[in-house]
Image: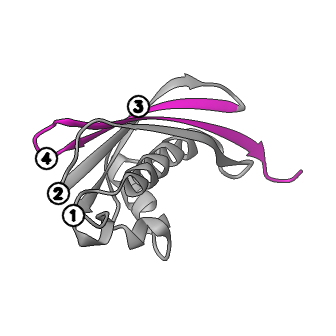
Amino acid sequence: MQLSKEAVLEKANKACKNTLMETLNIEVVDFGADFLVAKMPVNSRVHQPDGLLHGGATAALAESVGSFVSHIFIDTDKFFVRGLEITANHLKSVRDGFVYAKATFLHKGRTTQLLDIRVTDDADNLISICKLSTISLPKNK
């Protein structure tokens, strides 16, 4: 049974309760055949001391989005997803508004996945480019 777009978004956002994603106010806002998008507000909760978006918060957003998109495309009754490695190149700074992370697959294997995650601001400026490797492992082993 295929879930509707609305059902996937609701399920993803429900899964964020009582997690880092809720702490950072990350919200999944769009999803398609090969991508997922989430947004995060840029405010003092995610700033570094000089008032700019913290790179660690950006990396947390990117890993959250990448893990979610990997999770959506596996049989979660049989497998779970874990992050293996994340890299982030920060290109531009942000003081306020929202940042949006869009994760797409570069490789979607049975065991490992490689995702490209582009983080943009409200004006669609490229803020960070991230790569995330994930692994799907069997639950009952």
Give the CA separation, mark 4 to mark 2. Answer: 11 Å
Q: Say what secondary structure mark 4 lies in.
A: loop
Ranked by sequence position, the earlier of labels 2 and 3 is: 3
Q: Amino acid at mark 2?
A: Arg
Chief secondary structure of the magenta span? strand
Spot occupied by residue 119 in the image (x, y as percentages of width and height):
30, 40
Spot occupied by residue 84 in the image (x, y as percentages of width and height):
66, 42
Q: Residue at image x 24%, y 71%?
A: 44
Magenta segment includes 121: yes
Let me know if residue 20 appears in the view: yes
Measured along the vertical axis of the image, is residue 108 above or below residue 67?
A: above
Ranked by sequence position, the earlier of labels 4 and 3 is: 3
Spot occupied by residue 126 in the image (x, y as percentages of width and height):
23, 34
Give the CA separation, mark 2 to mark 3. Answer: 32 Å
Label placed on residue 95: 2
Q: Residues within 10 Å of mark 4 (few under 14, many from 20)?
A: few
Q: Residue at image x 19%, y 45%?
A: 121
Give the CA separation, mark 2 to mark 1. Answer: 6 Å
The residue carrying mark 4 is 122
Report the span colored magenta: 112-141
Ranked by sequence position, the earlier of labels 1 and 4 is: 1
Q: Is residue 1 left or right of residue 32?
A: right
Residue placed furthest toward the bottom? 18
Residue placed furthest toward the left? 123
The residue carrying mark 3 is 33
Q: Is residue 83 left or right of residue 132?
A: right
Residue placed furthest toward the top? 106
